[in-house]
């Protein structure tokens, strides 16, 4: 599950891929849904030169650590990156819903609908 969240960890948009699919697919799908922001905090799975370039074209500074296999290390704001933990914790509230934590639904459409419902109830106004 790939999600774009605001600074408080509230989800703005979702994209779901199969477990064996690269994170680049989710990054490409959500690129157009990114709101106007100064920074994007992401994990190592989103480390790609094309993604960093696309973010910079939108005026967003990437705060994504480089993959361990990179020859040239990527510089990123480690202090700012620690805030990603808060977003992960708040997004983890979706797993409080048993149906989502256990992947009870095998149909992707039904599972995605359950995620949307849980996000609406958990993070709604």
Image (tube, helix red, strand yellow):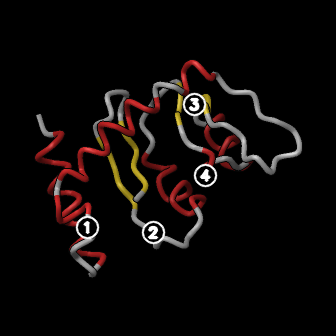
To which residue does mark 1 refer? 102
Helix, strand or loop for disc 1 = loop
Instruction: Please tell me which residue is depicted at 30% across the width and 76% down the height of the picture.
Output: 108
Foreground: disc 3 or disc 2: 2
To which residue does mark 2 refer? 17
Instruction: Name the spot of residue 37 as percent of width and height, x first.
Output: 47, 28
Mark number, residue 45: 4
Label 3 to label 2, Cα distance in Å? 24 Å
- Please, is residue 91 above or below residue 63 in the view? below
Depth check, front residue: 86 or 8: 86
Instruction: Name the spot of residue 118 as percent of width and height, x first.
Output: 16, 53
Helix, strand or loop for disc 4 = helix
Label 4 to label 2, Cα distance in Å? 14 Å
Depth check, front residue: 8 or 88: 88
Label 1 to label 4, Cα distance in Å? 23 Å
Q: Quadrant of the C terminus?
A: top left
- Please, is residue 30 above or below residue 39 in the view? below
Foreground: disc 1 or disc 2: 1
Mark 4: give few (<14), some (14-19) or many (20+) Cα within 10 Å. Answer: some
């Amino acid at each position: 599950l790939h999600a774009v969240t605001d600074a408080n960890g509230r989800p703005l948009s979702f994209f779901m891929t199969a477990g064996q699919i690269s994170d680049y697919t989710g990054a490409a799908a959500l690129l157009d849904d990114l709101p106007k922001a100064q920074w994007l905090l992401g994990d190592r799975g989103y480390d790609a030169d094309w993604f960093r370039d696309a973010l910079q074209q939108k005026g967003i500074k990437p705060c994504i650590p480089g993959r361990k296999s990179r020859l040239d290390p990527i510089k990123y704001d480690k202090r700012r990156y620690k805030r990603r933990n808060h977003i992960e914790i708040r997004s983890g509230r979706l797993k409080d819903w048993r149906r989502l934590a256990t992947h009870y639904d095998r149909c992707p459409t039904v599972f995605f609908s359950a995620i949307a419902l849980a996000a609406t109830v958990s993070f709604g106004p």
